[in-house]
Image (spheres, rainbow, N blue to C red):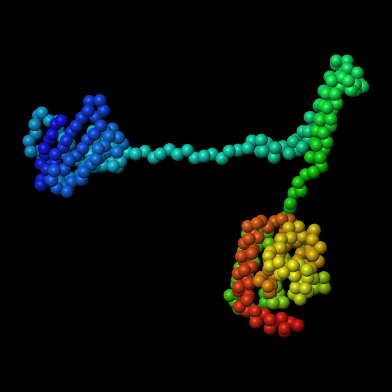
């Protein structure tokens, strides 16, 4: 144990240097006077180095030849390099940890099957045909009688093999005959239409137009009809062309629509109705104002006083997220239009 007493202006420090021959683990700095900080034991050779930087430089009181020379400046350093440190006492900076990012696994078999769909569908046919040929070749090569003998184990094995081969052939034929139908987007057959109820204030009209722009930009919506209080509040997008007036859209008969089964069913249930493939529903005749080739329709109730009819250009083109979003939009429209229900009722009476 060796002690070195240094005078630093008004501060006096006692440095206790305790070295172990094998490990040399601890260096402790014990302040005797002043507002010095106490540094606990620190392992020598660690990446965490400590140096305490004094505000003023000092000169040793007496330089003895028996003690090793000390650097003029001491500072505590925690992993950050200091410009005042000498080259022999340069700190060791902490390197950034090298994290391994998990890589997504790729299903090679599924990718190969999707890229070679025709080959996979015909593969059972080839396997079944090859199995039949192998059975016939085996019986011909080894001189087995062509007529199956129930007492022969070879004949029973061949019969089982032939049955499995025929099953493979039939499976391949079924796979070739049943193919998923590709869903294509169609162009609505009709005319562009934009009709807005005039008694509504500007902010309500702006909200209705915002609904249309949002639905047409984000979803497969190509037609939008909103009926509230027996009044067609909005008809926009592609509409069916009137037979009597070329180039004009078919008018929405709100009274007839509200007496139909589609409207009554939606209002009674109070929930959204999604007709994913409109051509399969007989209620399509109640929507003559939509284009004739409309593929899908969403019927969204607006409280118990109206309905929003959204026509799409793709079979099953509206996702679950689209349906949930349209439900929220319907609630907002009901809240807005309910404020002007009186004006809409007067409009309905005038039209009658």
Residue 74, position in %: x, y?
Answer: 19, 40
- Nearest the viewer among 21 and 299 is 21
Whether 196 is drawn above or below 114: the answer is below
- Nearest the viewer among 167 and 51 is 167
Q: Quadrant of the C terminus?
A: bottom right
Q: Quadrant of the N terminus?
A: top left
Residue 302, position in %: x, y?
Answer: 66, 70
Q: Residue furthest right?
A: 147
On the picture, is 319 further left or further right than 105? right
Q: Residue furthest top?
A: 142
Can residue 100 be seen in the rendering of this structure? yes
Whether 139 is drawn above or below 188: the answer is above
Residue that appears at 76% across and 57% down = 277
- Nearest the viewer among 324 and 317 is 324
Quadrant in the picture for residue 174 = top right
On the picture, is 340 further left or further right than 96? right
How many numbered markers are drawn?
A: 0
Residue 316, position in %: x, y?
Answer: 71, 55
Whether 344 is drawn above or below 47: the answer is below
Residue 166, position in %: x, y?
Answer: 84, 32
Residue that appears at 68% across and 74% down = 305
Residue that appears at 74% across and 36% down = 120
Q: Residue furthest front?
A: 151
Quadrant in the picture for residue 144 = top right
């Amino acid at each position: 144990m060796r002690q070195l007493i240094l005078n630093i202006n008004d501060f006096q420090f006692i440095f206790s240097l305790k070295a172990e021959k094998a490990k040399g683990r601890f260096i402790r700095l014990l302040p005797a006077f002043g507002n010095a900080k106490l540094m606990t034991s620190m392992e020598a050779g660690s990446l965490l180095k400590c140096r305490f930087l004094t505000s003023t430089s000092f000169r040793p009181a007496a330089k003895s030849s028996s003690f090793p020379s000390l650097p003029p400046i001491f500072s505590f350093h925690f992993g950050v390099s200091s410009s005042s440190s000498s080259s022999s006492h340069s700190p060791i900076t902490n390197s950034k940890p090298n994290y391994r990012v998990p890589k997504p696994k790729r299903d090679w078999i599924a990718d190969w099957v999707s890229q070679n769909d025709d080959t996979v569908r015909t593969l059972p046919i080839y396997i079944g045909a090859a199995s039949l040929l192998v059975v016939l070749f085996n019986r011909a090569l080894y001189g087995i009688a062509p007529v199956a003998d129930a007492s022969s184990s070879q004949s029973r094995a061949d019969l089982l093999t032939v049955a499995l081969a025929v099953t493979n052939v039939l499976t391949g034929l079924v796979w070739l005959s049943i193919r998923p139908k590709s869903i294509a987007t169609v162009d609505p057959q009709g005319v562009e239409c934009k009709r807005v109820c005039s008694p509504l204030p500007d902010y309500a009209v702006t909200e209705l137009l915002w609904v249309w722009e949002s639905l047409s930009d984000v979803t497969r919506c190509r037609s939008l009809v909103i009926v509230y209080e027996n009044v067609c509040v909005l008809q926009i997008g592609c509409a069916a062309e009137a037979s009597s007036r070329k180039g004009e859209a078919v008018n929405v008969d709100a009274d007839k629509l509200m007496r139909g089964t589609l409207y009554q069913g939606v209002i009674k249930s109070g929930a959204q109705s999604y007709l994913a493939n409109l051509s399969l529903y007989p209620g399509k005749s109640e929507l003559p104002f939509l284009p004739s080739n409309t593929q899908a329709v969403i019927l969204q109730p607006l409280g118990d006083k109206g309905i929003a009819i959204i026509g799409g250009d793709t079979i099953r083109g509206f996702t679950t997220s689209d349906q949930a979003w349209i439900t929220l939009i319907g609630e907002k429209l009901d809240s807005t239009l309910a404020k002007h229900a009186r004006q809409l009722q007067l409009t309905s009476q005038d039209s009658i």
